[in-house]
Amino acid sequence: MWSGRSLQNRTGGGNFMKEGGEALRVACFGAGYFARFHYEVWRSLPRVRLIGACDKDREKAEAIGVSAFDDLATMLKMTSPDVLDIITPPETHLEAIRATVAHGARAIICQKPFCSSLAEAREAADIAEAAGALLVVHENFRFQPWYRTIKQALDDGLIGDLLQVTFRLRTGDGQGPQAYLDRQPYFQKMPRLLVRETGVHWIDTFRYLLGEPEAVYADLRKLNPVIEGEDAAFFIFEYPNGVRALFDGNRLLDHAAEDCRTTLGEALVEGTGGTLSLSGDGSVRMRRFGSHEEKVLLAARNWKGFGGDCVKNLICHVVDGLIDGTPLENEARDYLKVIAIEEAIYESDRQGKKIREFERA
Ligand SMILES: NC(=O)c1ccc[n+]([C@@H]2O[C@H](COP(=O)([O-])OP(=O)(O)OC[C@H]3O[C@@H](n4cnc5c(N)ncnc54)[C@H](O)[C@@H]3O)[C@@H](O)[C@H]2O)c1
């Protein structure tokens, strides 16, 4: 985490808000399925001007309704953005970051899975740092309002000494030969699916709630024969003092929710003094140990946008960091730890044993 002061030092340019309060100029790379949530947010922010959209499929870029490009180099040359938002698959990230930094952009936000490997992700972080550019990973789940509520409750000591956290991912979209084809068809071909593509959000969320794990154990399965990667996964994180976090993910099963994509599942956060529970409608309740009564800490509501509007929350967090100098989460250097843990999860499953030594991020 670093503050606006160090941002100013690193970029050597003072505050990002330009003379006369001119808006931050933002261009986006990628205009596929998930990009729509990004574009909606960028358009809605008063201190931002969306100046370009790029996709190798030019029609998709044109559908956004701003200057459209099918090649990143051309977009960078024609628009000179302050910020590039990368919403393309991992194999495009490193080169896009290299080109954008070389072009002098001051900040880049990049979707997860971040780059194709830990080595590539490290190189991307090095490139950005050497140029004094900010590089933030779009790891949005920690910005979901229910995790902010849970974190606050933990910090306030509402459930005594924390003993364990469980998240059950139950998206219900993984059965049969048509699994994922309507929304994210590339899921069927990913050699690593559940942990790399989706479970990674809880690697980061567990870090957000509990800090860095000391060891991981994982058991991964492929249940739907039509796909290449795993679609069910357990991973357990070990922390000091007997604290554990368990991710129990299964894309073939669902949970009780109007929309299984609001939270993607259910969580329990259990301490000596009580339990916090996250339901599929995004509500968080607290029950004191020994009691049957529940107190609502966060009520269910019709959240605008994806996953409790977490795309907006993340983007606003970065814009505030750039313009106001507020401290930033999710910088690429710190996020290398997430990728190192992800690799340890696959290694644990391969070896059938607990992994304590993560590759140094
Ligand atoms: N954080 C989240 O909650 C979340 C949710 C869904 C997807 N994602 C991530 O967002 C990224 C995009 O996912 P998606 O579902 O939108 O995928 P998608 O396949 O629908 O869209 C990707 C787009 O990138 C374009 N593209 C690929 N290579 C390109 C290149 N070299 N130059 C220009 N354009 C290129 C494709 O034409 C496509 O339109 C993935 O990394 C995915 O994991 C994140």
Image (cartoon, helix red, strand yellow):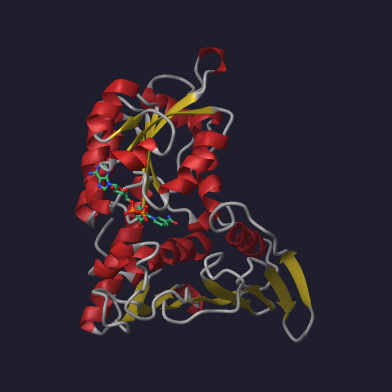
Residue at (49, 80) in percent of width and height: 242
Residue 173 pos. (x, y %): 43, 74
**Based on the displayed image, in which of its 4 quarters is residue 224 positioned?**
bottom left
Evaluate whether residue 288 shows in this view: yes
Residue at (35, 67) in percent of width and height: 181
Q: Against 31, is 319 above or below?
A: above
The reply, left or right, for residue 122 in relation to residue 276 is left
Total numbered labels placed on residues in the image:
0
Give 175 or 208, whichever is nearer the viewer: 175
Residue at (40, 68) in percent of width and height: 199
Evaluate whether residue 29 shows in this view: no
Residue 194 pos. (x, y %): 35, 71
Q: Against 330, is 221 above or below?
A: below
The reply, left or right, for residue 117 in relation to residue 233 is left
Residue 77 pos. (x, y %): 27, 23
Give 180 or 47, whichever is nearer the viewer: 180
Residue 268 pos. (x, y %): 59, 76
Where, quadrant-wise, is the N terminus in this rendering? top left
Residue at (62, 52) in percent of width and height: 304
Where, quadrant-wise, is the C terminus in this rendering? bottom left
Give 301 or 22, whichever is nearer the viewer: 301
The reply, left or right, for residue 31 in relation to residue 286 is left
Give 126 or 250, whichever is nearer the viewer: 250
